[in-house]
Image: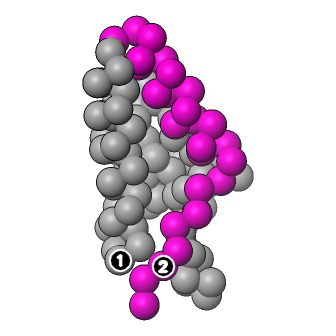
Amino acid sequence: MPYDVEWKQGAIEDVTALFDYIAENSSLWDARDVTERILNATDKLAEFPRLYEVDSRYGEGVHRISLVGQHVLYEVDDQAKQIRVLAVVGQRQNPYSIR
């Protein structure tokens, strides 16, 4: 049975801000491409919740997807069969606990 993928409000705001930044400083095409790649990567989590590695620098049990200069951070709740996307942060940012 697939897991549900839920985006926390802060993660939605992170992706929206990233889209706006890229659209303003590069192009609308690049902004759509980066956003689409992030969304496609998180869509895979429904079937493969542990596809990406745990990075304890962001908190216990926090998994990290690294792509297009960003880290997509998420946690897995096996009891609820749920993935929670917690944040999207730049790879150059120093790691910090997101919980």
Q: Relative to residue 75, is residue 81 depicted above or below?
A: below
- 84 or 98: nearer the eye? 84
- 6 or 68: nearer the eye? 6
User: Looking at the image, is mark 1 or mark 2 earlier in the sequence?
Assistant: 2
Q: Relative to residue 23, is residue 11 depicted above or below?
A: below
**Mark 2, residue position:** 3
Q: Relative to residue 68, is residue 40 depicted above or below?
A: below
- The residue sitting at the top extreme is 25
Q: Relative to residue 34, is residue 73 depicted above or below?
A: below
Quadrant of residue 48 within the rendered picture: bottom left
> Is 28 within the magenta?
no
Are there few (<14), some (14-19), or many (20+) residues within 10 Å of tag 2? some
> Mark 2 and mark 1 in contact (Cβ < 8 Å)?
yes
Dominant secondary structure (helix, strand or loop) of the stretch shown in magenta: helix
Mark 2 element type: loop
Question: Quick check: can you spot residue 28?
Answer: yes
Kindly identify the residue that appears in the image at 59 percent across and 43 percent down: 12
Quadrant of residue 87 within the rendered picture: top right
Q: Which mark is residue 33?
A: none
Mark 1 element type: loop
**Mark 1, residue position:** 47
Amino acid carrying mark 1 in the image: Glu
Kindly identify the residue that appears in the image at 33 percent across and 54 percent down: 40
Kindly identify the residue that appears in the image at 40 percent across and 9 percent down: 25
Find residue 18 and report its horizontal and vertical position in percent.
49, 27
Is 44 positioned to the left or the right of 24 in the image?
left
Q: Which residues are magenta?
A: 1-26
Amino acid carrying mark 2 in the image: Tyr
